[in-house]
Image: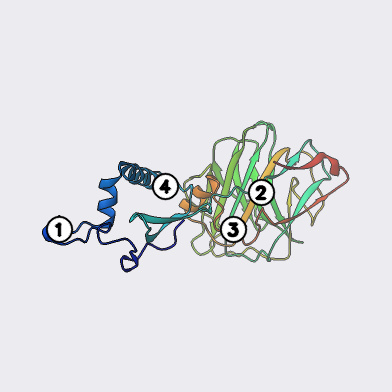
Amino acid sequence: MIEEGINENQCHCSSKECGNEDSSRNGPPVSALHHGLTASPSRWIQVLFVVLSLSLLCSLCALGAIGGLYFRGRNQFGLVDIQVNNQLNNTAEPVRRTLVFTKETNNSYVELLPQKNLSMQAFTLCMRLGTELASGKREIILFAYRTVDFDELNVWREADSTYILYLQGSYDGVSFHLPELNTFETNLCVTWESKSGLTAFHVDGKRSVRKMYKQGNIVQPGGRVILGQDPDSLLGSFDINQCFVGEIRDVNMWDYVLSDSMIGALHGGKLFPKGNIFDWETVKLQVNGIDKEIIKTLWD
């Protein structure tokens, strides 16, 4: 690519070649670019090629396939010189690390180690999961954060197919009627904010109605986060009839509420901003229990 266009003061051609002969003999001066285009039909092909290329690049920009175009002046042909930013525009795929819980157990689970403590006045929790545990059969724990004294933050799919968020050991969680989980992957998010109490679920980028729950409360630090089991004590007292069976990945958590548009973008595969409690690309996982072999970690 040519960095700079030729300066008109640097023309080394003769006066005839540059079109600067006496006007009485040759008429008004003709620019080098115009002279070149009229003299060589192939130059028109170059112009057409650049115009079509610009159109294609602009279309790719609009689709997010490339980061942007930067116009850098004119090159030696008098045509616009372009630099293309070839970095993807926040469309990088997440790390394809998937946890596969292959069968029911009352002793095996995966612990997630957070980047910071879970003292939260708001949060957004997202994950992608699939299961063939049919509704009506039993309840399923989807996410569990337990302190010494309480189930501080739990997300459940109940036997009647409702989805419930429980905070601080309460028995009066806030429930939502959502599309059923199935063998195909579902992107599930839940948001909560203490000041207003507003709570919502998002399924595949679409938000439920908002409901008020636990206004003024704070999620307390000092607990442990696990997937696959519901601990009725700190990392213990599991019930095989509550465990998760299926696949889980892309578990991300923020200590604030993401906007609807951001959650929609996450569902589409974009990763901005990264979770500041859990970032699935970097979070440390610990597989625990007697039957560790029933939990598989796959990399796609």
- The answer to whether marks 4 and 3 mark residues whose Cβ atoms lie closer than 8 Å is no
Q: Which quarter of the picture shows residue 4?
A: bottom left
Marks 4 and 1 sit apart, C-alpha to C-alpha, by 38 Å
In this view, the residue in front, 12 or 109, is 12
User: Pointer 1: residues within 10 angstroms few (<14), some, or many (20+)?
Assistant: few
Residue 218 on image: x %, y %: 61, 65
Identify residue for label 1. 28
Number of the label disc, if any, that sits on residue 95: 2
**Please, which residue is most extreme toward the left here?**
24
Could you tell me which residue is drawn at 68 percent across and 66 percent down?
A: 116
Question: In the image, which is nearer the foreground, mark 2 or mark 3?
Answer: 2
Marks 4 and 3 sit apart, C-alpha to C-alpha, by 28 Å
Q: SS class of the residue under badge 4?
A: helix
* Mark 2: amino acid: Val
First in sequence: mark 4 or mark 3?
4
First in sequence: mark 3 or mark 1?
1
Marks 2 and 4 sit apart, C-alpha to C-alpha, by 28 Å
Marks 1 and 2 sit apart, C-alpha to C-alpha, by 65 Å
Number of the label disc, if any, that sits on residue 57: 4
Q: SS class of the residue under badge 3?
A: loop
Where 59 falls versus 220 (above or below)?
A: above
First in sequence: mark 1 or mark 2?
1
Where 300 falls versus 256 (above or below)?
A: above
In this view, the residue in front, 133 or 83, is 83
Number of the label disc, if any, that sits on residue 274: 3
Residue 13 on image: x %, y %: 32, 61
First in sequence: mark 2 or mark 3?
2
Marks 2 and 3 sit apart, C-alpha to C-alpha, by 12 Å
Question: In the image, which is nearer the foreground, mark 1 or mark 2?
Answer: 1
